[in-house]
Image (cartoon, rainbow, N blue to C red):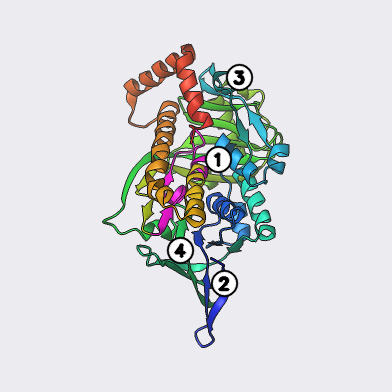
Amino acid sequence: MRKLKCCRRNPRRKEVNMKTDVAIIGAGPAGLMLGHLLRQAGIEAVILEHRSADYVLSRIRAGILERVTVDLMKELGLDDRMNREGLPHDGFYLADGERMIHIDMKELTGQSVMVYGQTEITQDLMEAAAPRGLEIIYSAEEVALHDVDSDTPHVTFRKDGAEQRLDARFIAGCDGFHGPSRQAFPASVGKAFEKIYPFGWLGILADVPPCNDELIYANHERGFALASMRSKTRSRYYIQVPLSERVEDWPDDQIWDELATRLGPACTENITRGPSIEKSIAPLRSFVFEPLRHGSLFLAGDAAHVVPPTGAKGLNLASSDVAYLSKAFIRYFKKKEEAGLDTYSSTALARIWKAERFSWSLTTLMHRFPDAGAFGRRMQVAELDYIAASRAAQTSIAENYIGLPL
């Protein structure tokens, strides 16, 4: 089906109609990857994004890439900068006081992860869109989905004051937790599963070298801390804080002091302090919506699920959704096969729930919960003791961290 721009215009109502094969809602990594994979296969796609391009690029998110995400970028031929600037990581640490438990992913599984920021992935995908014929409409306001339970769904939106309509065979909702796609599911069809954690992560980004070559997840009596990085000269740190905290109440020096305390003596002397270039507090939740399909509407990424950032599964789960969904769309348009579309939801959800389990378990292990008490703390210590002495336990963590196979 060939995309037709401005195929019908009503001058009195300033209405513009378009048509495409797949309408993608959301220009984050999930929507961009899906659009590129479809265009590479000769399938027309148009991406609608509520925000501006500058806003999309300003969002500071995850930085650990599983093999599924790395492989998708390679498949698209967009991995050059990632290969040059990304940092392969063979392991990470679980810290508890002075104890540092090394999880050697490379030795245990033969695989590694890649440190390369989500912002960089988004930039690579955005810059390649126009040269490859992938249309992205930014600042699309009042996006609404219609007739999603039929074979002829469409999306309406406003752009530069004009009412516009995009007809498609399918709609892919990649528009995040607060987007309109999941809201288009009837209440009788969808079910949400959610856990809200009683704390958030206060993050600081600074142009300073990281304190360690590998990530450190720390469990301290004052709360969780994480030492991570975006490059050899840019560091990303987090500390656990109550949800009542405000960013403006945390000057940089106070955050650096808290990090030095929580990360422990092995890290303190290696922390390089510097002015923050970004600070924010992110609440933690586990969320899954089922099913991922209703009629001609499919969900992928944060529109379908949210994980705590512990374990770095958010972006990578979106990538696995896109890997499944793109193959299903391609089979439909190229071979008229619907089997992949019919099994997309169950296939993706099986992997999603396993990733949710890992993120939940690592969050439970490494954070201090207000109501856990002495018993809860003893369970954390016992679990860390077991992990420290068990190759099997370390292998299980490593397998989940690098990402379960598709």
The quadrant in which residue 270 appears is top right
Q: List the residue tagged with mark 1.
A: 203
Mark before the other along the chain sequence, 3 or 2:
2
Query: Mark 1 and mark 2 in contact (Cβ < 8 Å)?
Result: no
Q: What residue is shown at x 50% (from left), y 68% (from top)?
A: 141
Query: Mark 3 and mark 1 in contact (Cβ < 8 Å)?
Result: no
Question: For the magenta stretch, what is the residue range?
Answer: 296-319
For residue 266, which numbered disc appears in the image? Answer: 3
Q: Amino acid at mark 1?
A: Gly
Is 283 in front, or is 329? 329
Q: What residue is shown at x 51% (from left), y 24% (from top)?
A: 398
Is 393 in front, or is 94? 393
Mark 1 vs mark 4, foreground winner is 4
For residue 330, which numbered disc appears in the image? Answer: none
Is residue 198 positioned above or below 263 on the image?
below
The quadrant in which residue 273 appears is top right
Mark 3 vs mark 2, foreground winner is 2
- Was residue 318 drawn as part of the magenta stretch in this picture? yes
Dot 1 alpha-carbon crowd within 10 angstroms: few under 14, some 14 to 19, many 20 or more: many
Q: List the residue tagged with mark 2.
A: 4
Is residue 361 positioned above or below 133 on the image?
above
Mark before the other along the chain sequence, 1 or 3:
1
